[in-house]
Image (tube, grey):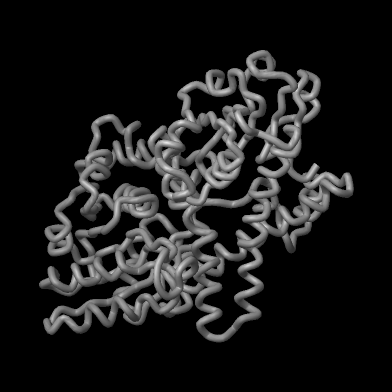
Amino acid sequence: MKISKICCIGAGYVGGPTMAVIAKKNPNIQVTIVDINAERIAAWNDEDVSKLPIYEPGLAEIVAETRGKNLFFSTEINKAIDESEMIFISVNTPTKTYGKGKGMAADLKYVELCARNIADVAKTDKIVVEKSTLPVRTAQAIKSILHNTGSDVKFDILSNPEFLAEGTAIQDLLNPDRVLIGGESEEAIEALANIYGSWVPQDQILRTNVWSSELSKLTANAFLAQRISSINAISELCERTEADVSEVARAIGMDSRIGSKFLNASIGFGGSCFQKDILNLVYIARSYGLNEVADYWEQVIILNDHQKRRFSDNLISTLYNTVSGKKIAMLGWAFKKDTNDTRESAAIYVADHLLNEQANIAVYDPKVPSQKVYSDLDYLQTRSEEENKDLVETFDNPYDAVKDAHAIAIMTEWDEFKTYDWKKIFGLMKKPAFIFDGRNILNKDEMTEIGFEYSSIGK
């Protein structure tokens, strides 16, 4: 099947970059990204590509190159569905906050709405591709909806999970370790494989059944998150035994069976995928009565939450067991560098804990806007929006953020933090001046020589 028009429902962190790269590598295919959020679509269409709603190195350049040629952003969802031969579902699948599976299962209401919309609009055969991170057997639900429309339209359902790391998403798309396509129809699988095949070698395009494809995504993220929680568990032991977690990580990382990736001790993992996918895996395991399996994977989340709380507890105890009325400058709000995504960022939960202790928080992040900081804290519903506004202040300049601060907490590993004039920062702070390096990015000897009381993870 020759594909000439693609529609992607969802203009978020997955849909935007993925479709931009597909458009770049397939100039003969028209790619239209649609979303009900008119403000987001307007941002994607902004003439100034530095104002795109998603920050990802290399993304703006690709959008500038393809937009208006074969890449389009629109709110006309039905029109795009009707005209396309292939439809990607790339909508949000948050963890449920209500009902059965609350706190663990994925909320599929947006996926179901997409499927019903496609079923209502489609007049010609379609290939429907799951791109959102979804629990196992979601394809079956989509198939059930699409195949019971009462029409003669044929729908082929494919699972094509993304394996992107935010901050390197464009490079991950341009040079993927593998592309995974799960489905029943060989013709549909090959139609999608041919699109990726315009830049990905065929031996890196894996064909599986749908269920294997869906489970592979959850499992990959669970394994990566497990490594982070494992090294963070060792970091606490290192602090008690005078070992250095960086040296431990380097030693075990040189073991070819283990490798060095995801062994950086830190305040903990965040982002939209790891916690959500593990909780999903836990929920699935429990639903099949596999309680020991569920308990095993849930411990990864428990350890991650412990690491965040341990960081804030250490900050409080070091500041003489009280932060009430004290200014804490938080450098970084995004869950990792090179992205403006704040979902499940450790900074949110550490700030919330410190605010419960009546601290005053000053936030600087080079890519996260002020309103996002407040909306993240308001979402927790720990206190009123007015209280958050009173206790938290955001800054556009790091030196303004740290002025008169009792302590600095480094929450995101932005490279620019290493280049700051730390002698100047020391002069701006109250004394003694504390640094709590949640990402181990600064040099302890240099910081202590300047005069800082410096604390890091696992050392």
The x and y percentages for residue 317 are 74, 39
In this rendering, the answer to whether 240 lies above or below 415 is: below
Q: How many marks?
A: 0
**The C terminus sits in image quarter:** top right
Residue at image coords 24%, 53%: 35
Residue at image coords 32%, 38%: 52
Compared across the picture, whether 268 is left or right of 107 comes to right
Compared across the picture, whether 259 is left or right of 9 comes to right
Q: Is residue 32 visible?
A: no
The x and y percentages for residue 177 are 53, 59
The x and y percentages for residue 239 are 82, 46
Residue at image coords 22%, 82%: 147
Residue at image coords 77%, 45%: 458
* Closer-to-camera residue (58/387): 387
Compared across the picture, whether 266 is left or right of 332 comes to right
Query: Which image quarter: residue 438?
Result: top right
In this rendering, the answer to whether 345 lies above or below 321 is: below
**The N terminus sits in image quarter:** bottom left
Query: Which image quarter: residue 336?
Result: top right
In this rendering, the answer to whether 137 lies above or below 381 is: below
Q: Is residue 310 visible?
A: yes
* Closer-to-camera residue (161/439): 439
In this rendering, the answer to whether 352 lies above or below 448 is: below
The x and y percentages for residue 136 are 44, 76
Identify the residue at the far right of this view.
241
